[in-house]
Image: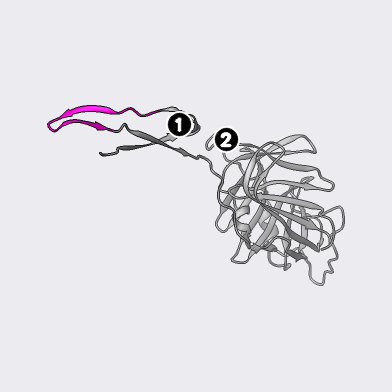
Amino acid sequence: MKKKITVVLILGVLSAFLLSMLNKWEPKQTAYASDSGIQTESAAYIIFFPIMFNAPPPPHEPPYDMARFMIGNGRLYEVWHSVNNSQARFQTQTEGVRFFHTKGNEVSAEWEELWATNDTIYRGTDTSPGNGQFYTLRDHPNQVGSAWSPRFWNVGDIYERNPLVTFYWKSNCDIVVQGYQRTWLRLEAYYHSYTFESGITLYNVVELAWLLNPNAEPTEVYLYAEHYGLVGWRSTDHGYSYISEIHAPGERPDNTPEEIACLQATLQESPVGLNSIIGPLPPPYRAK
């Protein structure tokens, strides 16, 4: 006697319901005539296999590649900020080897400039400190860019930095203030899943702590999520922010990075004059 098995794939939650119905169903024998007499054939058995959509991605293994968390794929999302109870639209945009965390909208968006090498994450210019200013980081006075973190990192590891930080006015690129800023960055945690106060859950998230000394409590904390980039932060004196809405592809236009007309001139010349003596960056100024 042949047994016929029909395999049916049932989508979504219907599979669970139909599977419970199957448990109550008793197959009937079907009789038919043939030249050799009466034979029977077993009824078809239906097997339901549930299909999982939006299943969590697999977790990452240490050491963690910071580029996978910091370089978003261009999706648009809103980030809410506690200080003024407002939202800004975020999007990672790439230009050659550099990537930019843009924050604003399709009219104008401030941005943070970063890039990755085989072993290091670098920062360049950040147009988002407020007060009509921007700043640029330099490890060497005549070269834009500062090593910000290792590219591959283990939880608990700490990274020391001491870049030259130069603040400029956006209006004319005159120097506001500059100085060296010695800080430490620590990979505080890795989360396979992280749920924000908005109720949004993202997968594969890292938490970085910005420290004024290696044993201090964090002054600032940053959260980066795979496929997104920067999705939240908090500080001891500037409130906190978190991802609050995710836009579907095509639902909103891309962010338009703000342009600073005199920016290129600041990148092509050293801000340090001959025989200049540069001290620490004075408070309350600080840079990531």
Q: Position of residue 251 (x, y in %)?
A: 55, 34
- Residue on which disc 2 sits: 252
Measuring 70% from the left and 67% from the top, which residue is drawn there?
142
Amino acid type at circle 2 is Arg
Magenta span includes 139: no
The answer to whether 100 is drawn above or below residue 79 in the figure is below
- Res. 288 visible in picture: no
Quarter of the image with the C terminus is bottom right
Task: Looking at the picture, tell me which residue is in the foreground, 225 or 251.
Answer: 225
Measuring 68% from the left and 58% from the top, which residue is drawn there?
124
- Residue on which disc 1 sits: 23
Q: Secondary structure at mark 1?
A: helix
Task: Looking at the picture, tell me which residue is in the foreground, 270 or 167.
Answer: 167
Q: Residue furthest right?
A: 283
Question: Of callouts 1 and 2, which one flags the residue occurring earlier in the amino acid sequence?
Answer: 1
97 relative position to 135: left or right:
left
